[in-house]
Image (spheres, rainbow, N blue to C red):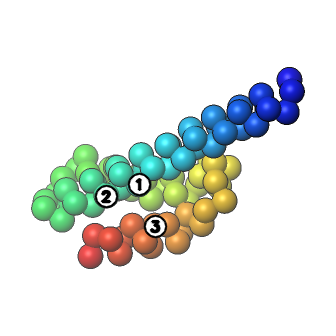
């Protein structure tokens, strides 16, 4: 594989990783919004917990160099 193809493949993987993280952030925001309306929303609570766990996970750190804890703090601040 030549270097241009390798770079294209790397870019595709980076795009996928970014899309995964962006979706998790959107899911977190939606779950947080739903919990603010109804603190007993079990599905929103589950999504909220799962996304927090994802941002703290080894998988997250393999997808990006972002600090998951810092990202969580920023997401929490958004909803205040």
The image position of residue 68, as x and y in percent, is 55, 63
Q: Going 52% across and 71% down the picture, which residue do you hit?
A: 70
Residues at marks 2 and 3, CA–CA distance in whole angstroms: 10 Å
Residue 46 image position (x, y, % from top left) = 32, 50
Q: Position of 39 compared to 56: left or right? A: left
Q: Secondary structure at mark 1?
A: helix
Q: Are the residues at dot 2 and dot 1 in contact (C-beta closer than 8 Å)? A: yes
Q: Which residue is mark 1?
A: 25
12 relative position to 38: left or right: right
Tell me the SS state at disc 3.
Answer: helix
Label 3 crowd (10 A; few <14 / some 14-19 / many >=20): some
User: Which residue is under mark 3?
Assistant: 72
State which tag comes first along the sequence, 3 or 1: 1
Q: Are marks 3 and 1 in contact (CB under 8 Å)?
A: no
Q: Residue furthest front?
A: 4
Residue drawn 60% across the image and 66% down it:
67
Residue under circle 2? Answer: 29
Q: Position of residue 28 (x, y in %)?
A: 35, 55
């Amino acid at each position: 594989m030549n270097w241009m193809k390798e770079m294209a493949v790397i870019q595709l993987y980076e795009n996928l990783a970014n899309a995964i993280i962006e979706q998790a952030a959107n899911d977190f925001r939606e779950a947080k919004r739903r919990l603010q309306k109804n603190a007993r929303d079990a599905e929103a609570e589950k999504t909220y917990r799962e996304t927090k766990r994802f941002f703290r996970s080894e998988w997250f750190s393999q997808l990006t160099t972002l600090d998951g804890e810092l990202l969580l703090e920023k997401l929490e601040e958004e909803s205040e």
